[in-house]
């Protein structure tokens, strides 16, 4: 029966979609990369300009470094300085809702069947759950969705107001996250598809708007150059694209894990999208290229799984059977949905005991909070030797002690990262690591093999220990 007959059920469905991201983000866990982002935002605020060399690590002090997410970092640090970790969670919740709303808007504008568009948005929200962290990639997901929305409008023969705003979004995007290049992937597919369709003799959907799209792409490209680093920003893109080790050792860059349900959900969406393309009687190279590019990036790194979800929202509705029903929700239904989502979000936060104190407890249960306090209280000096995983946190908590390594893989390079991983795993030659041998202070995970080895190493003395961390100094 049409959803128009049941506005209450329609509102309930919408509430269910938007509660999914709130269930994911309203938790005491914090992202591992949050901390060095906070420190960068603090540094830029204190100095009034972006850094040209790395101010946070001993290795990078004399090396060029591009703070490619500087604007994101200023925003997050500004929120943190006023609202603490509670503000970070609120920011995470707002961005998660914005991303799901953008996905929902994308499919609902082209799929008039309320049930189909809403259920697809719900599936997309479930698939996005692992990515709903306080990371700048949320802006990439949001702005890529807006780019695709504008592009689909052009292919359908109309220009929305977003067409004129898109270059401004790219200006922001280039200062928020390095993956703004994914927007150019979508725009490039949009420019290439009419040419390829013409070569293949396929219907020329979107061919009439080729010059408009080319002009829009050029304007967006020029807008990305309005950043403190200019063309140097594109050098960072090349650095990340040519590294291979991070895709084996950084969790978010590894391939999808099919030991949990979400990996299978993304795979199911990919297979369903491929099936939908195969069922089409009138193909366009745009859909084929969009899906192929999304699949390659998604199955290379789980961080990019959202691309397959996005292509599924564009391609799948055409093969779902059923007739279109009327649009049934007015402003009062939308307002009711918003109120209910807000109320449920507050209920989730209350039920989970979310507070500043609870968030600080969550921080101390994962990161070496108490060890850092001991180091500061006792005045231990560097050089500091630390693990790859904890480098970002130590940048934040021990601002006067440059770290030996952290998660900025393009700065440290694959050789240094591999050597550090070998040393911390206690592999052959660990004791000969020059950075360890010259360190005066070591902060180690209590469970790390190197922590056990250093207990019997005469070069170091154990001075602090708790459930999370151990601290060694050179006698």
Image (tube, helix red, strand yellow):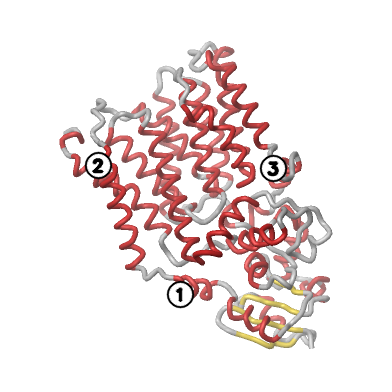
Q: In the rendered structure, are the residues bearing label 2 and label 1 in contact, judged by CB atoms less than 8 Å apart? A: no
Q: In the rendered structure, are the residues bearing label 1 and label 3 in contact, judged by CB atoms less than 8 Å apart? A: no
Say whether residue 364 is left or right of residue 322: right
Q: Earlier in the sequence, mark 2 or mark 1?
A: 2
Q: Find residue 447 and report its image quarter.
A: bottom right
Q: Secondary structure at mark 1?
A: helix
Assess disc 3: are there few (<14), some (14-19) or many (≥20) residues with their C-alpha within 10 Å of its C-alpha: some
- Residue 274: percent from left, percent from top: 45, 32
Q: Earlier in the sequence, mark 2 or mark 3?
A: 3
- Residue 107: percent from left, percent from top: 39, 33
Say whether residue 308 is left or right of residue 319: right
- Residue 141: percent from left, percent from top: 51, 43
Q: CA distance from mark 1 to mark 3?
A: 38 Å
Q: Secondary structure at mark 3?
A: loop
**Residue at 37% across / 28% down in the picture?**
110
Q: Nearer the viewer, residue 265 or 125?
A: 125
Q: Is residue 466 above or below residue 122?
A: below
**Residue at 44% across / 46% down in the picture?**
98
Q: Secondary structure at mark 2?
A: helix
The circle drawn on residue 227 is 3
Q: Find residue 109 and report its image quarter.
A: top left
- Residue 356: percent from left, percent from top: 46, 71
**Residue at 75% across / 64% down in the picture?**
57
Q: Earlier in the sequence, mark 1 or mark 3?
A: 3
Residue tagged 2: 333
Q: Is residue 266 above or below residue 449?
A: above
Q: Find residue 380 and report its image quarter.
A: bottom right
Residue tagged 1: 357
Q: Nearer the viewer, residue 148 or 55?
A: 55
Q: CA distance from mark 2 to mark 1?
A: 36 Å
Say whether residue 433 is left or right of residue 347: right
């Amino acid at each position: 029966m049409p959803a128009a007959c049941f506005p209450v059920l329609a509102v309930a469905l919408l509430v269910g979609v938007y509660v999914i991201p709130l269930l994911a983000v309203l938790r005491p866990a914090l992202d591992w990369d949050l901390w060095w982002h906070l420190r960068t935002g603090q540094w830029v605020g204190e100095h009034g300009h972006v850094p040209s060399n790395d101010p946070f690590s001993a290795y990078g002090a004399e090396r060029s470094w591009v703070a490619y997410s500087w604007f994101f970092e200023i925003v997050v640090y500004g929120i943190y300085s006023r609202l603490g970790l509670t503000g970070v969670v609120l920011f995470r919740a707002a961005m998660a809702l914005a991303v799901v709303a953008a996905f929902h808007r994308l499919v609902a504008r082209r799929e008039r069947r309320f049930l189909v568009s809403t259920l697809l948005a719900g599936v997309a929200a479930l698939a996005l759950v692992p990515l709903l962290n306080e990371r700048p990639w949320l802006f990439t997901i949001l702005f890529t969705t807006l780019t695709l929305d504008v592009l689909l409008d052009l292919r359908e023969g109309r220009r929305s107001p977003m067409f004129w705003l898109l270059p401004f979004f790219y200006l922001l995007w280039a200062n928020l996250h390095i993956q703004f290049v994914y927007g150019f992937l979508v725009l490039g597919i949009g420019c290439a598809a009419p040419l390829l369709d013409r070569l293949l003799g396929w219907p020329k959907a979107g061919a009439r708007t080729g010059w408009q799209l080319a002009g829009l792409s050029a304007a967006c490209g020029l807008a990305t150059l309005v950043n403190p680093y200019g063309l140097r920003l594109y050098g960072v893109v090349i650095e990340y694209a040519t590294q291979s080790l991070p895709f084996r050792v950084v969790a978010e860059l590894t391939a999808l894990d099919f030991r949990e349900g979400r990996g299978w959900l993304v795979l199911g969406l990919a297979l369903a999208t491929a099936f939908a393309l195969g069922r089409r009687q009138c193909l366009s190279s745009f859909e084929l290229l969009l899906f192929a590019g999304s699949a390659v990036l998604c199955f290379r790194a789980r961080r990019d799984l959202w691309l397959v979800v996005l292509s599924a929202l564009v391609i799948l509705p055409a093969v779902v059977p059923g007739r279109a029903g009327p649009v049934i929700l007015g402003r009062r239904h939308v307002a009711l949905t918003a109120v209910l989502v807000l109320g449920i979000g507050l209920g989730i936060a209350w039920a989970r005991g979310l507070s500043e104190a609870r968030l600080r407890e969550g921080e101390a249960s994962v990161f070496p909070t108490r060890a850092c306090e001991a180091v500061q209280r006792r005045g231990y000096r560097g050089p500091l030797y630390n693990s790859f995983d904890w480098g970002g946190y130590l940048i934040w908590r021990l601002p006067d002690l440059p770290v030996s390594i952290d998660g900025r893989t393009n700065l440290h390079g694959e050789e240094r990262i591999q050597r550090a991983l070998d040393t911390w795993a206690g592999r052959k030659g660990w004791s000969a690591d020059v950075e360890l041998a010259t360190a005066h202070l070591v902060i180690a995970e209590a469970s790390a093999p190197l922590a056990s080895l250093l207990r019997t190493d005469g070069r170091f003395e154990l001075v602090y220990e708790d459930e999370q961390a151990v601290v060694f100094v050179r006698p």
